[in-house]
Image: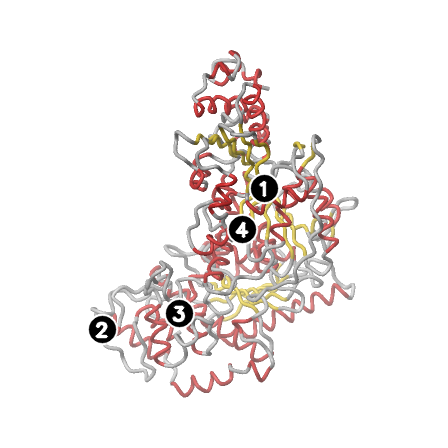
Amino acid sequence: MWVVAHMTYAQRVDLSGRRLPADAFKETPEGHTGGALNVAPAYVAYLAANVLSAQTRGWLLGQGHTVAAVEAANSLVDNLSIRQVGRYGHDEAGLSRLCADFYGYQIAADGRPAAPLGSHVNAHTAGGLSEGGYLGFAEIQYVHMPLPGESLVAILSDGAFEEQRGSDWSERWWREHDCGLVAPMMILNGRRIEQRTEIAQDGGARWLARHLEVNGFDPFEIDGRDPAAFVWAIFESERRLLDAAKRVRDGHATYPVKLPYAIATTVKGFGLPGAGTNRAHNLPIEGSLRSDAAARAEFDAAAKVLFVPAEELASARSLFAAHARQGRPKERDNALATRAPEAPVLPQGISGSAGKTASAMVAIDHWFVDFVGANPNHRFRVGNPDELRSNQMGGTLDLLKHRVNRPESGSHEAIDGKVITALNEEAAIGAALGNKGGLNLAVSYEAFAVKMLGALRQDIIFARQQKEAGRPPRWIGVPLIVTSHTWENGKNQQSHQDPTIGEALLGEMSDVSRVMFAADAATAVEALRQVYGARGVIACVVVAKRPMPNLFDAAAAARAFADGAVTLEADDSPALQLVAIGAYHLMEAQRAAKRLRERGHRVLVTCIVEPGRLRAPRDEFEAEFVLPDPRLAALFPPALPRLLVSHTRPEPMLGVLRRIDGGPSKLRAHGYLSRGGTLDAPGMLFTNRCTWAHLVASAAGLMAAPIDSLLTGPEASAVAGRGDPAVLR
């Protein structure tokens, strides 16, 4: 706690305990100090519990902005990541550097942070699993994280508990045979940034305990100022959970077991003046310690109480440095932080039947059932926010079943089901993202997958930071299938017509955030093969669930993903290239090409299955992932006019595809125009100007051809908005 206070306010420390001069304090302190002070006893207790039990547990921080507590303790016990070794440490120089780096805002020549330290948990935080910047996502993932035989200490917050609902369901998912031990501990300090938490307003720890009991937890209260109480809470939680599981095994109880939950009551910012006030969230002491003698005196008085003499620290450090003697890894190398599951067996792709139609989602379902059978040693989680069978994944549901506490007779439910179904998109994706020791899938309506974006982005940016730090994550790729999508969900009004999720994820780095658009059944299955064959990536796979023409076989689909795009139709000396993204849009592009050929124009038809492979790289890691210039030029001849039709809004896709954009006179783009309603698929295509006829009209402009040479009068009138749209069907 003494180090945490100095990290916020001071540029350095003095291990003799002497008062620091005014110029040793920061001009602009920062720190989320109140929460960090409260987390310090909990994290030190986590370290102590590992020593006492000779077992290295994983840890998870629900509020990543309290990371100062973790970094301070790690420096004191020499539990440092590779980049931190030699820069930080338990001596005066190492701790002073830690203080100077904290909110130091140093930037390296390549534009990345220069210090291996951040304001939240980051890739350099020893043993860290997640940034914790999106409050509440730790709460919906922790129960899915440890494998059997592993243990996880989850240090959670009352503010995060209120931020993201879904953590109340954790007890529904825990099963001894496929879950490790979890010890959730809430820091109940009673304050958010500007006001008290609702828990504090509604009755504090007693109210929370009642709430938890109603939701299937086994809560108990501890003194959140006492690290020994936290140590006991870890052991007590594990004991209660093991005892509960044994009662189930012995036939004396049934699932769900009551999940132990420690409520650590404390005061926000305990240890510094201002504790318990609104300002305790960030800067408990008011005034500038550099220029305000009174504020500096407040700090000095508090620091004196928190100070521990160097010889006592040395004695304690020797007790914590027991890893070699106990034959266990350091906390930085805990099992959850170093996930590297065995590579899965990937069943072969499917062969397309030219001229026939098939549902890509049905093809995925059949392949995934085979995938489960081929990988019996992996733990599976399927995150399902709604209707798996409606989304054509009936075989998967029949095999893996909804995980429930009381299965209904004759239903596809089971105590040990692998499908985590919750009418809460964040909780569903949390099951898949938390299970990094196993194999995962999430399936959602496209429009509602946007609710998952914060959770996805948190994992994507953490994985990318790990890659940049030189230790890329080794967990197996996680696909999110979005179906019942914008173009086939018109019956449910415009709220169900939204391609935002793919657009947003294309904004992240494409080597770790892959966005794929299946063109047919074979490309849909190959997309999953690509993701499960990769490490440390999250992929959004956009798939139509209605039957569509089969265009690819397994080998052709693999070639398409090797480049991110493939040419399907090629005339000699073409005058125009039609570029399609998405199954419905490829079908319209092919119909447009047919009309253009009938009227004497030669064309190329190219399908893009992964736009991120074609983008201009933004750094060296993305440069290794994108298609090189010669191969891009072979697929997209530089001088050729192009007509793009996309599943997404055209503007974000044009930005991604800047390398093939010759400007307005050379490229025109069609896509979702944020128009919709209660419409069928042809109606959606028409209202968003994506029908074959709209494409032909744009082609006329690019080729300087009279529109009446390409479209009939009624067709041209329909495109112009004056005729009957039905003529275009």
Q: Amino acid at mark 4?
A: Arg
Q: Position of residue 466 (x, y in %)?
A: 49, 62
User: Which residue type does callout 2 highlight?
Assistant: Asp
Which is more N-terminal, label 1 or label 4? 4
Q: Which residue is mark 4?
A: 165
- Work out whether mark 2 precedes mark 3 in sequence or the reverse, and give the earlier one: 2
Badge 4 density bin: few <14, some 14–19, many ≥20, Cα 10 Å: some
To which residue does mark 2 refer? Answer: 23
Amino acid type assigned to the residue bearing label 3 in the image: Phe
Answer above or below: position of 515 versus 181. Answer: above
- Residues tagged 3 and 1 counted as in contact (Cβ below 8 A): no
Tell me: residue 506, above or below residue 672.
below
First reached walking from the N terminus: tag 2 or tag 1: 2
Tell me the SS state at disc 1. strand
**Which mark identifies residue 62?**
none
Distance in Å between CA atoms under marks 4 and 2: 46 Å
Q: What residue would you read off at disc 1?
A: 482
